[in-house]
Amino acid sequence: MSQAKAHPVPQLSHDESQASSLIDVDSPHISSVKSDFESQSVQTDTQAERMIREAENETERARQEAVKKAESAKEKASAQAKKAKSTLKKDGKKLADNRDNPVVVGNAVLWAITAAAVGYGAYQKHQEGKLDWKLAGTVAGGIGALAVGDYFASQWLLENKYPPK
């Protein structure tokens, strides 16, 4: 028995040129464009409109992101302000509770007298024309030494003689 051969299946030729066609979906009708159309300058109104819409969308996204960051910064600043206010209230209450402590009263009197004496002395030296940076530096150093001594004396008194409430 002889077998009959089937006819060969026709083949499609795979010949793609450099200018493959793509469909422009932005237009109301179908037209073909070259595959490198995005690298070319704008050739149609629909492409220009699409580019404008994309730019507007990008601008809106950037604006929304900026608003989100601003709100986040505002919330963070608000939280820090509340924390600072709480700390100040706590410190104010601590000071109010200890306002009759001799160490606190002594420090208030000491620094009030020091400020008045330095202010009066500086005014007198200025009137005499003898106020210069050398004198100001010397006085500032003396005030710094007084502050260090006051700190350690106050710490010792608060720990040993007059503990805070």
Image (cartoon, rainbow, N blue to C red):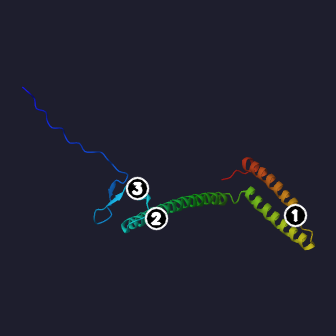
Nearer to the camera, 104 or 123: 123
The quarter of the image holding the N terminus is top left
Query: Could you say whether the residue bearing mark 2 is in a helix, strand or loop?
Result: helix
Foreground mark, 1 or 3, reads 3
Q: Which residue is mark 2?
A: 59
Residue 17 in picture, x, y percent from top left: 35, 51
Apparent side of residue 43 relative to residue 75 in the rendered image (left or right): left
> Pointer 1: residues within 10 angstroms few (<14), some, or many (20+)?
few
Nearer to the camera, 54 or 99: 54
Tell me the kind of residue under disc 3.
Answer: Asp
Report, in whole angstroms, how far the alpha carbon at label 1 lies from the one at label 3.
75 Å
Tell me the kind of residue under disc 1.
Answer: Trp
Residue 12 in picture, x, y percent from top left: 25, 45
Query: Which is nearer the N-term, disc 1 or disc 3?
Result: 3
Report, in whole angstroms, how far the alpha carbon at label 2 lies from the one at label 3.
26 Å
Residue extending furthest toward the top = 1
Nearer to the camera, 57 or 151: 57
Q: Which residue is mark 1?
A: 133
Query: Could you say whether the residue bearing mark 1 is in a helix, strand or loop?
Result: helix
Given contact means CB atoms under 8 Å apart, are the residues at marks 2 and 3 in contact? no
Q: How many marks?
A: 3
Tell me the kind of residue under disc 2.
Answer: Thr
Q: Which residue is mark 3?
A: 36
Apparent side of residue 78 relative to residue 134 in the rendered image (left or right): left
